[in-house]
Image: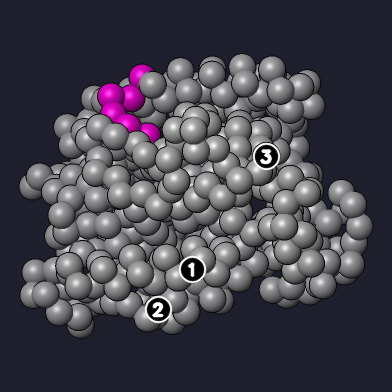
Amino acid sequence: MTTNITNCPLFSFGVLADVQYADIPNRLNFAKTSMRYYRNSIKLVHQAALTWNQDSCKPSFAVHLGDLIDGFNNREGKANSEKALRDILTEFDKFDGPVHHILGNHDFYNFTRKELWDSRLNTTQLTGKVNVEDTTTSRNPTNPPENECGCSNKLYYKFNPHPDFCFVVLDTYDISGCSHLQQCPRYEEALKILCAVNKNTGYELNSPTGLEGKERRYVLYNGGVGKEQLQWLRNVLEEATRKQQTVFILDHIPIFGATDQCLLWNYEEVLETLGEFDCVAAVLSGHTHTYNYGEDTNGIRHIIFPGIVEATPGTNAFATIDVYSDYCDIRGYGQMPSFTLRYPRWNKTMGKVCTDSTKETSVQATS
């Protein structure tokens, strides 16, 4: 790949979403609207890893925005899920840098929260080239989760790849019916929220049938951010403001710009929290499998990444993001477009709220 980069960024990082690998034939999605290329997805991760390694602005880390292996793996039992996970992580291991894994609904279809905590998908304590400050309890065997669900372990955290930047990983399945065991109080809390709006039953809680508008987000494959996590987020943003840091939010379920049935349950609360601060540059999400870009009323940019699993064979769907003090270049591959994103309100150079234009301009990229 060639680019028109003329100056060196502060750092770069790679992004991709919704790999959903499974060793099964292609098939249509749940809504029968698009094809999923399950076996092809592992090849695309391989291509992304090699591309990042060979980049002149080599990423110092990468991010996968959730749904690493598909739920179909678990239909053949836990051993099959574990094999699929090993196979896809082998391809990620070919990238010469740490990878942060945000958890999505398909990850919870395969493993319990406790199992994920004990797996390599728990990157809350990731070490290496990225400075991570976590919110978790210890993974020492002498300090086990409070119950079999593992809900006492917090899967949200922050890390600082540069002194002027803070990356915040949200757990958008903090409150959810698919990420907690049925005996867990958070499962009961989630079902109460869900069933107050969605009157379907059983597996049909995954369907928005009978719901209209934004109510369509109340389906079983979505979730919400709990009050404790929301307060933690506010504290992190307060600290970032004091340090004059620019913040990127990473999550699986979008909080803006997605179709109604793919929105976070309490997206309004999270948007309101983010809108209280001038330090947030962008929110990077997955889940929908379709690229989308939007700007909320507070000027925060929301980028939804296309799903690797639905990338047509012969293309791809990932990006390398080159980060500068007051903007970043997003260099997309395949179904992910390329453009320049200027941080909306926080002027790092002047140390005050930015009033300059935030118009996007394209960055030349060919592969």
**Where 153 falls versus 28 (above or below)?**
below
Colour scheme shown: one colour
Q: Name the residue under label 1.
A: 230
**Residue 292 location (% of width, % of height):** 50, 58
Q: Earlier in the sequence, mark 1 or mark 2?
A: 1
Instruction: Point out the image quarter for the N terminus.
Output: top left
**Where 50 falls versus 317 (above or below)?**
above
**Residue 140 location (% of width, % of height):** 44, 33
Which residue corresponds to the image point at 41% horizontal and 66% vertical from the top-left?
233
Q: Which mark is residue 44?
A: none
CB under 8 Å between callouts 3 and 2?
no
**Residue 248 location (% of width, % of height):** 33, 59
The kind of residue on which mark 2 rests is Gly
- Numbered disc 1: secondary structure: helix
- Kindly report which numbered mark, 3 or 2, lies closer to the viewer in this rendering: 3
Q: Name the residue under label 3.
A: 148
Q: In this view, does 267 lie to the left or right of 47?
A: right
- How far apart marks 1 and 3 lie (CA) works out to 24 Å
Q: Does the magenta stretch include residue 95?
A: yes
CB under 8 Å between callouts 1 and 3?
no
- Kindly report which numbered mark, 1 or 3, lies closer to the viewer in this rendering: 3
Q: Which mark is residue 275?
A: 2
- Numbered disc 2: secondary structure: helix
Quarter where residue 125 is shown? top left
Residue 347 in sight from this viewpoint: yes
- How far apart marks 1 and 2 lie (CA) works out to 13 Å
Which residue corresponds to the image point at 74% horizontal and 45% vertical from the top-left?
181
**Few, some or many residues within 10 Å of mark 2 (<14, 14–19, 20+):** some
Magenta stretch? 94-99
